[in-house]
Image (cartoon, rainbow, N blue to C red):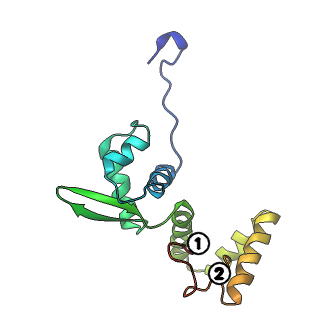
Amino acid sequence: MDRSRGDLGRRPRKRGQGELESQVLEVLSKATEPVTAGWVQERLGGELAYTTVMTILSRLLAKQAVSRSRSGRVYLWLAASDAAGLAAMRMRRVLDTESDRDAVLASFVSALLPEDERRLRALLDGSAEGRPADGYSPQDRPAGRREH
């Protein structure tokens, strides 16, 4: 700590829930091939401990947001989802824990900003016709394009 700047007793900013997971997924999504946890740590600026990166990767694996394979003595990691996909998984888990799904969904929609409500309606209208918002049916989707 630099006492000359009055930093005494100041704690680093606490990250929001899921922020590190989103950062790790963002780094992984930029990789052109499966990468090591050390590679991820370096791309995050090296401020996180290697064990922290491994913990985050393991949590993402449990959420099926990443995949891993063994290469010799190390694991290689690959994004199976992006940050939006991870947020959607979180939302789905919350919804799955509630007994009154209708009430939860109604409360969610009523709390949306008007622009977000229009976006949601457009997405639902696309799905109602059997096509996701990107315009592709699952069998017609170009290789490598993920449905969100």
Q: Quadrant of residue 108?
A: bottom right
Q: Is residue 66 above or below residue 10?
A: below
1 relative position to 121: left or right = left
- Residue that label 2 marks: 132
The residue positioned 31% from the left and 64% from the top of the image is 68
Which residue is most to the left? 73
Callout 2 amino acid? Pro
**Disc sitting over residue 148 in the figure:** 1
The residue positioned 37% from the left and 44% from the top of the image is 41
Closer to the chain start, of discs 1 and 2, is: 2
Q: Nearer the viewer, residue 107 or 89?
A: 89
Q: Is residue 33 above or below residue 37?
A: below
Q: Residue 115: give x, y in percent of width and height.
A: 80, 64
The number of numbered badges drawn on the structure is 2
The residue positioned 51% from the left and 64% from the top of the image is 86
**Disc sitting over residue 51 in the figure:** none
Q: Residue 102: give x, y in percent of width and height.
A: 66, 81
Instruction: Give me the C-alpha separation between circle 1 and circle 2.
Output: 8 Å
